[in-house]
Amino acid sequence: MSTIQLLKKASQMVDELARIGQSTPAELAKVISEPRPTVYRIVAALEQAKLVRSAGDGRLELGTAILKLGDAAADALVDRAELHSQLRWVRGQLGMSAYFCVLRENGAVCLDQVEGSDVTLLDLAPGRTIPLHAGAASQALLASASAEFQAAVLQSGPYGRIASQTPLTAEALRKKIEQAAVRGWSVEDSEVTEGVASVGVPVFRRDGSLLGAVAVAGLRGSVLGHEAIARQTLDAAAQAITAFTAEDGANDARDTAGSEEPQGSEREAPRTPAVIAKASALMAALAEERIATSARLTELLEEPVSSVYRMLATLAEAGWVEQIGHRGAYRVGSKLVALSGEFSRRADIRRAAAPILRAIHEATGETTFLCIRRGTRAVCIDRIDGIRVNSRVLQLGESLPLHVGAAPRALLAFEGRESWEEYAAIAANTGEPWLRGRSRSEFYAELEEIKEHGFVLSDNQVTPGIAAVGAPIFNHRGEVAASLSVSGMREGLLAPPDGDPIAELVVRGARALSDYLGAPPFPAANDADVFRAIVDRASPA
C-alpha cells in the first residue's frame, strides 16, 4: 500500500470513530475495505500517536492527541486565550452564551464558547458545526463571504429543517443574508434550537479579510427586544478580537523555494505504518509552529522534501491541514476542531470514573462522589454509598455551593483568580453569610493553599463529625473538568487503620481520570509525604 493510500485509510478510520464513537478493528476493516492484519497495523500506529485509544471490550475510540490538534487548529486562526477572555466579557455584559465561529464549506465551526446563565446550548459547543443555512453566526459569516461562496450555498437549497423557523429555501436564506449585509449584523429566532434566539456580528482581520463571527444566544425572551444592546456589545468584542489577531499568515514566510511537489518515485516513500508516525510528527510540528512553510517542516522533521510534500498533500485532502493561499504556508486544518469536539462530546467521565469510584470504595468502605460544576454549584453526577455511615448530603443529582465542602472547593480552587472573584461577587449578592466571618482575602488565601497542596481536606465543614477529601480532574487544557471526593467519619477518614492517607487514593484516582481527558502530565512530587503532613495536622487526637 502506498504512502498516500495508507494515510487516507488511517484518516478514514479516525473519521469513522468520530462519526460513531466506538468501533472494533473488524468493523473498521469493512469501512476502509482492507484486511484485518492491515487494520491492526494501522491501529497500532494510530495508538502510538495517541490518535486512537482502547475503549475496552476490544473497541476503539478517538485518542487524546485529537484534542491537542484541535486546539492547535484554533490557535492558528486566533489567540484562544484572548478570544476566551472576550467571550467571558460578552457573557458578563449580557448573561447569554457567547461563542465564536469560523466559516468553512460544511458549516460554521465553533472554536470557543462560554456558557450563559440561563441555558446550556449543546449545539454551540466548541467543535460543533452549525449548518450554513441557519443561525445568526452563519448568516453573519455568509453576509461577509465572497459572492462565489454565497452562490454555492444558495444553489445547495432547499435545506433541511432544524427548528420551526429554519430557512428552507434559497430565496428565504437570500433575504436573511441581504438583511444581515445591510445591517452589518444578524438576528434569528428558533432557527437552530426551538425557543432560542441569537445575534451575530462578523469579525475581520486587520487586512480586511473575514476571520469569523462572534455571537450570543439565549432563551428568546432574553434576546429579542435587546438586539441593539447585544449588537453594541458584540461590536466591541469584534473590534478587540481584530486588534489581537494578525493577518492570515502575516508573521510567517511564504514557501518561495519550490512550492510545487518535487518529482520523485513513489517507491521512495515508506510503505508501512511508519508513515503514520511521520505524519503524526508532522502534525505535531505544525501544531507547535501554528503556521509553517513546507521548507520549515522539512527542516524540523529531517525528512526528504518529496516525502513532506506527499504527506502534506494527502493530509490536506483529508482536511487535517490547510494551505493558506496559493502556494502558501500550512496550518492544522479546522476539521481537527470538529474532531476534537466529537471527542469532548463523547468522552464519558461518569463511565470512566465508575471503576475508580468502586476501587476507592472497596479500599476504604467510605462514600465516594463524582461532581461537576454547574454555574455556582457542584452537582453530584455519581456516588457510591459508604458501608458504615452514609451522609445525606450531596445525593445523586443534588448540589452544594462551590465554597462548601471538599468536592465543590476542588472545582473552584483550581480555577484562576478571575473565577474566584466572579464567584465571590455572585455569592455576596445572595445575602447569605457565606464567608462565615472571613474576609475575601482570607477566602482567597484558603483557595491558594488548596491549589498548592493539590487536594482539599474538609473537616466538620458540612456535617458535624464528617470529613471529606476532594481532588480536581483536569481536561487537556489543564482546566478543571470535574472533582473526585470521599467522605466519612472524621476518625476513620483522617486516621485510616492501615496508615495510608485516603487523600492519596483520591488524588491518584483524579489523576487517572485527568489522563482519560488528555490532561498535561503532572509534575513529579513526593505525594505521600505531602498527604501525611497535611492530614496529620487535621487528624483527631
Image: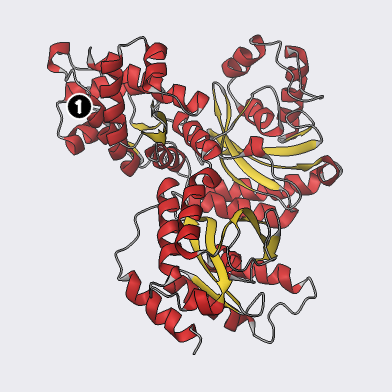
Residue 391 location, x and y as percent? Answer: 66, 67
Image height check: is 145 above or below 240?
above
Side (left or right) of 85 relative to 462: left
Classify residue 486 as left or right of residue 138.
Answer: left
Q: Quadrant of residue 204?
A: top right
Give the amino acid at mark 1. Answer: Ala
Q: Nearer the viewer, residue 97 or 343?
A: 343
Residue 128: percent from left, percent from top = 58, 33
Residue occupying the far front of the picture = 388
* Color theme of the render: secondary structure
- Residue 70 visible in rendering: yes
Quarter placement of the N terminus: top left
Please indicate whether residue 222 sits to the left or right of residue 62 in the image: right
In the displayed structure, 400 sits above or below 208; it is below
The residue wearing badge 1 is 274
At x 43%, y 36%, the residue is: 248
- Image label count: 1
Q: Quadrant of residue 6?
A: top left
Q: Quadrant of residue 42?
A: top left
**Would you call the spot at circle 1 few (<14 residues within 10 Å), some (14-19), or many (20 or more)?**
some
Q: Position of residue 3 (x, y in %)?
A: 23, 17
Q: Residue furthest bottom?
A: 541
Q: Is residue 229 above or below residue 153?
A: below
At horizontal 73% and vertical 23% (from top left) the residue drawn is 162
Picture coordinates of residue 141 (x, y %)? 63, 30
Q: Nearer the viewer, residue 539 or 155?
A: 539
- Asked whether 66 or 490 is in front, the reply is 490
- At horizontal 75% and vertical 47% (from top left) the residue drawn is 230
Residue 448 seen in this snapshot: no
Secondary structure beneath label 1? helix
Residue in the foreground of this view, choosing between 298 and 470: 470
